[in-house]
Each structure stands twice: as structure tokens, then as C-alpha cells.
Image: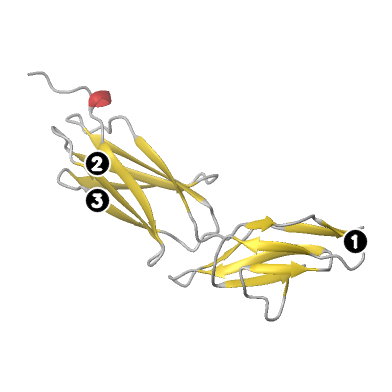
Amino acid sequence: CAALACEDVLVSGMTATLNTNNNSIDVQWTTGTGVQGYTLRWWEKGSSTINTRTLDASSTNATIALSCSNNFIYRVELAAICATGQPGTFTGIEVANSQVPQISLQGPDIICGTSTTELRSSRSSGNQWYRDGQVLAGATSQALTVSEPGVYTVRATGAAGCTYESNELFIVQN
């Protein structure tokens, strides 16, 4: 039997899951036949830094420790290493960092007179709201009712102790 060409050695059953308890991505896959090992690579989407790890042929899982980056999406790719020592075709998955809070607007972004609008964090707990870069004392719930114009953000602390900051949301007064 002829050896498989590098491009024909594929990884199957790959999954990647964010583990918020220890700020990592857990990767699993099914071991292939005729594989000499695996090349795992990952990066923060939008970054030019690619991290790489070589794993032995019996591997079926790996854990990627993440920095406390505010990046929202990670790209994880895995390729089997074929007989030539070169990686085959990479299989990839994007993993969203659900710890980074996202602000949604529950009303208009323009305040008139004494009107208010509501902002909501995608995180149910661990929130601290800011207006124009200043802490809003006592504003730690998921929702925030605002009556003043400004640039609003929310920071949330994850289970592993990392603090993540949301996108900015502008509220103007008419």
C-alpha cells in the first residue's frame, strides 16, 4: 500500500471549547491512522502572532492556556504530521471568548430632557460600569439605566481572575 499524501492526512472530530474556569481552550480530536504526530496552532483573531505546539501521534487532546487578552475570537487549527514530517491540511475552528462583555442598547442612543435609556452587558455577573472612563460607583448589575450622555463601557472579571473590557457605546443628548 502506498503511503497517504500529506494533504490526504486529515484530522477528524476536532472540537475546541472555551474553559472559563481556568482561562483556556480545550481541544479534542480523533487519532488518525498513519500519523506521525500533530501540529496545533492558534492565535487571537486580528493578531499576527501564531503560537505552535507539536504533539505526539497518540495525542487526542490539548489545552491552550490563554493570556488575559481582551480579544473576542481565537482561531485554533490542527494538522496531522505525515511520514515526510510535514503537516497535512489544517482543520480549524473559531472560539469566541464569552468572557469579554458586549454592550447592547435596549433603547435609543439619544437622550432628550429627562429621558433615560438602558444598556445591558452580555455578562450576567462580575460587571463594573464606566462613563467617560470613570467608575460609576455601585453600577455592578447586568443592566444600567443612563440619563446622561457619555461614552459607556463595562468591565467584567472572569472566574480565572482576568478582567475584560467591552466595546464603547456612545450616548448623546439632544
Marker disc for residue 112:
1
* For discs 1 and 3, the disc positioned in front in the rendered view: 1
Residue 138's spot in the image, x, y percent?
Answer: 67, 81
Q: Are marks 3 and 2 in contact (CB under 8 Å)?
A: no
Tell me the CA gap for discs 3 and 2.
10 Å
**Residue at which label 2 appears:** 38
Disc on the earlier residue, 1 or 3? 3
Going by the image, does 149 lie left or right of 56? Answer: right
Residue 162 x, y percent position in the rendering: 49, 69
Q: Amino acid at mark 3?
A: Asn
Which of the marked residues, 2 or 1, is nearer the chain's N terminus? 2
Q: Secondary structure at mark 2?
A: strand
Q: Which mark is residue 61?
A: 3
Image side of residue 74 versus residue 112, left or right: left
Question: Residue, x 72% and y 76% (percent of image)?
Answer: 136
Task: Give the camera-side residue of 86 and 2.
Answer: 2
Q: Which quadrant of the structure image shows residue 37?
A: top left
